[in-house]
Amino acid sequence: MAVWTIKTLDQLVGNFVMGPERYDPRRNHLQESPGANSNCVLGDLICLNRKTVTASATLGQCLVLDTSDAKEGIITNRKPTVEGALIGSQKKVVAHRDVIISRLRPYLRQAAYVDEAIEPEGNATIVASTEFFVLRPLDERSIAFLVPFLLCDAVQKVLSVSQEGGHHPRFDEQTLLSVPMPDEWLEQRDSISKDVERAAQLYRQQQGILSKLVQRATSVFREVSP
């Protein structure tokens, strides 16, 4: 079914942006939802970390997170660290307890909590693709509760209809920051955050067990090899 909207010249944003995606009325779906809280949006709860670094030997060792390393709330990266001079293109700096979400192709659901169990070798720096928005808590309270919220159907639909561009569709910063936060979700933020953190811990345990079993299987084949 076609979606229609009419805008006058003075309603065009920026430098007269003409892209139809920018004015899709479904972008306002959450604001009009009965569960929405017009007094609090995501941008009131976090800050976006925009610090970036470029390849340099002075960075030391780096753990690089690509967009494919974040999936369904979990960081699945198992790659070794690399020298700072070899990180490739410009990267964003990430820290434990951040939440990251890729602005590129939101239907891939590349959002995750940066759990503290991700321990790079030594004092390595965690860096990520600039396609990620890096959400950082404003205080000591965990923002892990944002992960399932960002992955829920209602938010995903808004991010999907807000993406612009043909070859590499992305949603913009303002779309993310303006997502309304329901009172019910905010009231449970601490308990939900603990659940998300626990889920990340269980995933790391599963990774550790399987990794040891793979090593065990490898050693068996080495023993029988001629």
Image: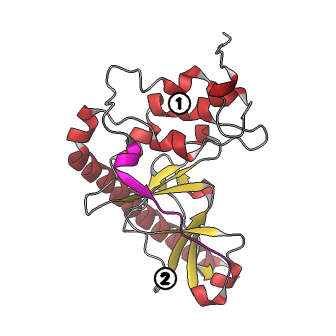
Q: Nearer the viewer, residue 197 or 135?
A: 135
Q: Nearer the viewer, residue 81 or 150?
A: 150
Vertical placement of residue 34 versus 46, above or below: above
- Please indicate whether residue 14 sits to the left or right of residue 95 in the image: right
The image quadrant that residue 148 belongs to is top left
Residue at screen point 43% across, 75% down: 119
Which of the labelled discs sits on residue 121, or is there none?
A: 2
Residue at screen point 67% across, 20% down: 8
- Please indicate whether residue 220 sits to the left or right of residue 118 in the image: right
Which of the labelled discs sits on residue 35, or is there none?
A: none
State the SS at label 1.
helix
Please state, as top left, top right, bottom left or bottom right, where the C terminus lies in the image. Answer: bottom right
Q: Residue furthest right?
A: 167
State the SS at label 2.
loop
Q: CA distance from mark 2 to mark 1?
A: 38 Å
Vertical placement of residue 16 versus 93, above or below: above
Decide whether residue 54 is among the magenta residues.
Answer: yes
> Amino acid type of disc 2?
Glu
Vertical placement of residue 40 versus 130, above or below: above
- Category of crowding for the residue at label 1, using alpha-carbon neighbours closer than 10 angstroms: few (below 14), some (14–19), many (at least 20): many
Residue at screen point 30% across, 32% down: 182
> Amino acid type of disc 1?
Val
Residue at screen point 41% across, 21% down: 32
Q: Which residues are magenta?
A: 42-55
Q: Nearer the viewer, residue 207 or 160?
A: 160
Please state, as top left, top right, bottom left or bottom right, where the N terminus lies in the image. Answer: top right
The image quadrant that residue 80 belongs to is bottom right
Which residue is disc 1 drawn over? Answer: 158
x%, y% of residue 6?
A: 66, 15
x%, y% of residue 44?
A: 35, 47
